[in-house]
């Protein structure tokens, strides 16, 4: 992808992000963070809310960390891909991933984790070992699911005989075990294994996830395994194993798997560029099909509001849980009511944002 084409697409992307961030009502996940969590993302949401009015204020820091992630992802791509145009293409695919677009438009902890992970990879590749320690400490305290990241580092260090990284990552793993932090593990086989594939298809787009899964498996069998691969593959493996017994939060794993866009494009380039032009057409057609479906999925997110209001049965819309409390609050205010008892805690949090409290508490 040429530089001017990337910047044109990025300009459109910024407009889309600000449009979504300023017009999309507060989501159940955001409301839970804002009113029922002590996470750093809750503090950032409060700061943003005090700085800028409306929905945009809630997502102000998500946009900031998202833009930071874009710049860092490009730098990481330049280290892994030979051509500058390939780095632009990888970054283009990365920013238009449904998971990235959503993470930048809605407040969440994953978008805070993402730049830290990318900066860690970048600094590790450059040999800035001492600078990695504060990044690891930051991840340790910010993200409970970062045990996945430290496990990936430990495996990479063992296989590549990096004693310093092995000791450091093992220390954080022991700290996780000692403090009983990390992902809660429990339950019994309950059929969430198929569900996790659907979640990954949502954050990647279906065809791109299939290729991601194929690349992870192919590299496992016969190709050189980079740090990016270890991080993404470990997160994928953990999520699949845990989904056998319990429902998992895709936000815990998304920051670690979506950085694999670089790995996927590198694998694609290796496959197509070793073949004569007449044998490349099937690979190019496959690429165009993947990109076409990715763009369709992205457009559904960008124009989801218009789609919601045009549907005969809005309850079937994927964003119904976002818009239902918003519309309910508007109706209650028109009726001069300022309280409502909801059966769901997250919906109560959403109504609270719109100034509708619980009647039972009154």
Image: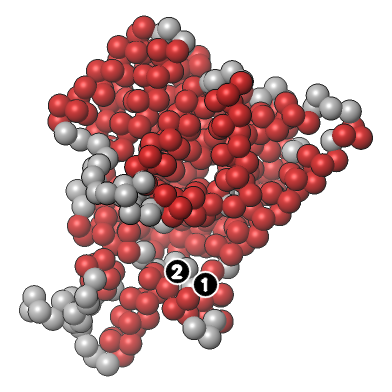
Residue at the spot 30% in from the left edge and 12% down from the top edge: 167
Please identify the quarter of the rendering in which residue 191 is found. bottom left
Q: Is residue 293 left or right of residue 123?
A: right
Residue highlighted by disc 2: 319
Q: Is residue 285 left or right of residue 59?
A: right
Residue highlighted by disc 1: 305
| Vertical placement of residue 159 versus 195, above or below | above
Sequence order check, earlier mark of 2 and 1: 1
Q: Nearer the viewer, mark 2 or mark 1?
A: 2
Residue at the spot 42% in from the left edge and 42% down from the top edge: 240
Q: In which quadrant of the rendered image does the C terminus lie? A: bottom left
How many discs mark residues in the rendered view?
A: 2
Name the spot of residue 206 as percent of width and height, x first.
Answer: 59, 52
Q: Residues within 10 Å of mark 1 (few under 14, many from 20)?
A: some
Q: Nearer the viewer, residue 344 or 276?
A: 276
Name the spot of residue 117 as percent of width and height, x first.
Answer: 42, 30
| Vertical placement of residue 309 versus 183, above or below | below
Q: Nearer the viewer, residue 340 or 2?
A: 340
Q: Nearer the viewer, residue 308 or 157?
A: 157
Please identify the quarter of the rendering in which residue 343 is found. bottom left
SS class of the residue under badge 2? loop
SS class of the residue under badge 1? helix
Q: Are marks 2 and 1 in contact (CB under 8 Å)?
A: yes
Residue at the spot 38% in from the left edge and 53% down from the top edge: 192
Q: Is residue 107 visible to us here?
A: no
Please identify the quarter of the rendering in which residue 30 is found. bottom left
Q: CA distance from mark 2 to mark 1?
A: 8 Å
Residue at the spot 53% in from the left edge and 86% down from the top edge: 312
């Amino acid at each position: 992808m040429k530089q001017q084409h990337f910047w044109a697409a990025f300009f459109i992307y910024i407009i889309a992000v600000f449009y979504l961030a300023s017009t999309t009502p507060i989501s159940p996940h955001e409301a839970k963070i804002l009113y029922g969590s002590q996470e750093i993302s809750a503090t950032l949401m409060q700061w943003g809310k005090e700085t800028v009015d409306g929905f945009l204020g809630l997502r102000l820091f998500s946009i900031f960390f998202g833009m930071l992630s874009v710049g860092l992802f490009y730098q990481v791509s330049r280290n892994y891909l030979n051509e500058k145009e390939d780095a632009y293409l990888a970054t283009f695919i990365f920013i238009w991933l449904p998971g990235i677009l959503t993470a930048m438009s809605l407040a969440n902890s994953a978008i805070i984790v993402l730049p830290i992970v990318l900066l860690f990879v970048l600094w590790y590749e450059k040999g800035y070992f001492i600078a990695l320690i504060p990044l690891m400490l930051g991840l340790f305290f910010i993200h409970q699911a970062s045990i996945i990241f430290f496990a990936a580092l430990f495996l990479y260090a063992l296989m590549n005989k990096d004693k310093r990284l092995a000791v450091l990552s093992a220390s954080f793993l022991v700290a996780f075990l000692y403090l009983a932090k990390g992902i809660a593990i429990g339950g019994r086989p309950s059929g969430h294994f198929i569900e996790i594939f659907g979640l990954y298809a949502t954050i990647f787009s279906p065809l791109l996830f299939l290729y991601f899964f194929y690349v992870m498996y192919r590299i496992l069998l016969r190709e050189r395994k980079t740090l990016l691969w270890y991080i993404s593959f470990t997160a994928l493996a953990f999520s699949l194993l845990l989904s056998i017994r319990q429902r998992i939060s895709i936000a815990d794993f998304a920051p670690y798997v979506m950085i694999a866009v670089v790995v996927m494009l590198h694998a694609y380039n290796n496959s197509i560029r070793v073949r004569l032009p007449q044998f490349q057409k099937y690979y190019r057609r496959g690429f165009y099909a993947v990109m076409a479906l990715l763009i369709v999925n992205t457009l559904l997110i960008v124009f989801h509001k218009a789609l919601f209001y045009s549907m005969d049965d809005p309850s079937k819309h994927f964003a119904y849980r976002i818009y239902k409390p918003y519309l309910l609050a508007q109706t209650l205010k028109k009726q001069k009511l300022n309280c409502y008892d909801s059966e769901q805690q997250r919906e109560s949090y959403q109504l609270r944002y719109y100034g509708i409290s619980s009647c039972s508490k009154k």
